[in-house]
Amino acid sequence: MRKPDRIFARDQEWAYLTRFAAASADRPQVGVVSGRRRQGKTYLVEGLAEQTGGLYFGATQATETESLALFAVAIGAHLDSPSPPRFDSWDDAVRFLFSIDAAGPFVIDEFPYLSQVSPALPSILQREIDQAASAGRRTKVLLCGSAMSVMGGLLGGTAPLRGRATLELVVRPFDYLLAAEYWGVGDPRLAALLHSVVGGTPAYRRFVNDDGPESLDDFDDWVLRTALSPASPLFREARYLLEEEMEVRDSALYHSVLAAVASGNRTRGGIANYVGRKATDIGHHLNVLEDSGLLRRRPDVFRPGRSGYEVAEPLIVFYQVVMRPQWGLLESGRAANVWEAARPRFSSLVVGPHFEQLCREYAMSAPVERFGELPGEIGAGVVPDRTNRSQIEVDVVVLAPAVSGQRRKVLSLGEAKWGEVMGRRHLSRLERARQLLSSDYDTSGTILACYSGAGFEPGLDPSVLTVGLDDLYRRPD
């Protein structure tokens, strides 16, 4: 099936969907498509319904009665019926749906809107799927939604649909290389700055009417006319991302938790101290944010059981660091003053940590020969230096796959600095970390790496891997 021209990239996702639609097994099939908002899921599933002759129904926030009426209208239009059917309950609606002999899948988009007001709907679907399996029917149902906490639970634990899905697809943001291509930005430094604000969410280009920064000199003006402009849809987007999550009740506390993490408080204790609560009081909030895809847990690769948190959406970090502290001034049109004062925080709390994450993504996608073998795990970690009573934070750690009975290989230790020219001082920290790790890990072939957005001092040992912005944005062959 030909992918519609309006869909940029997403070739792999389209292949998964078309394979699901083309499967010829003599039994019903269920697919679940999820992903944070604005990633283009609707473009994909709408395109699939168009190409296969399937039914597409986009749910909205409505009562059960209104949703049933809208669903009936969609079915009537799909069947070219002179008048839509009438459903008194989802029992009737789903039973009717499974009686239709359709060429393509039945796509129900924004399924969480329906299940929120009709909690029995997943169980009704399960019943009809099981009955269709007994009858040998080939009905295909594709459930799509953006509420990650809801979609993630559809197939888990004791959920009614557990074990019945043949497709579970998560539509993720574009990676940083694809995002640069999508925005049409060829300057690596500008691409990194842009990505630190809007990430890889494709809809944000539409939010600013395809207005991308034309050059590094234009970046400040671009921030002022888009993200910091009260007339831009991007201005309030970070707030909406949180408020659209169905599990969020006390949005003020959730915003404070996100602000704590964006400000550099990565541990549960640090977050709790920032928001003025006990660590036990914020456990639920951290879980909800993690389930919603707005927060992610980052394990310490050297200390099992210890982990920190980081905000998963760059625009939320930008909002919490730059916008939220001066929201009143921004709404009153003083964006230029706010941005001028926020530039140091933007560099240290937004771009710096974001650059570290880009470097870890680079290591993940690097050719096998870069580190000697295929990595088994990539992350960050802290190496205790008891002699010097200090700790060495390693930004990019590349570990080989664990092999039972053998010390795990450390393929690479790397430090990432956005605004510093890296040299001997940074390298000595990595050498010390390698020495300290040698008692528990195999560091005989460990490659030391310096990742910098500002360049490198001359005379570094040739054995040191140096990765600048040009290297970071050079797509592997």
Image (tube, rainbow, N blue to C red):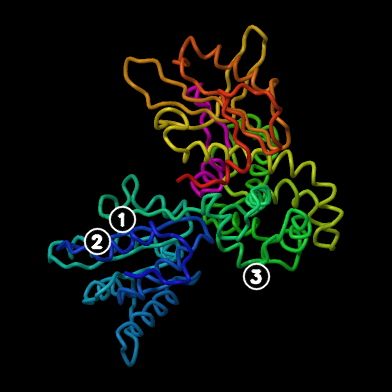
Q: Nearer the viewer, residue 12 or 291?
A: 12
Residue mark closest to the camera, 3 vs 2: 3
Disc 3 designates what residue? 209
Magenta stretch holds residue 306:
yes
Instruction: Tell me: 19 left or right of 269.
Output: left
* Mark positioned earlier in the residue sequence (2 or 1): 2
* Mark positioned earlier in the residue sequence (3 or 2): 2
Task: Bin the neighbour count of mark 3 within 10 Å (Cα to Cα): few under 14, some 14-19, many 20 and up.
Answer: few
Residue 62, can we see it? yes
Total labels: the figure holds 3
Q: Secondary structure at mark 3?
A: loop
Disc 2 designates what residue? 29
Residue mark closest to the camera, 3 vs 1: 3
Determine the residue positioned at 46% across, 51% down: 149
Q: Nearer the viewer, residue 47 or 188?
A: 188
The amino acid beneath tag 2 is: Gln
* Mark positioned earlier in the residue sequence (3 or 1): 1
Magenta range is 285-309
Query: Which residue is most to the left?
Result: 135
**In x, y percent, where is residue 286?**
56, 40
**In x, y percent, where is residue 445?**
46, 19
Instruction: Please determine whether, in this image, residue 257 is positioned above or below residue 160.
Output: above
Q: Quadrant of residue 80?
A: bottom left
Instruction: Tell me: 44 left or right of 21.
Output: right
The amino acid beneath tag 3 is: Asn
Magenta stretch holds residue 336:
no
Determine the residue positioned at 40% across, 71% down: 47
Q: Quadrant of residue 393?
A: top right
Instruction: Tell me the number on the disc at residue 167.
Output: 1
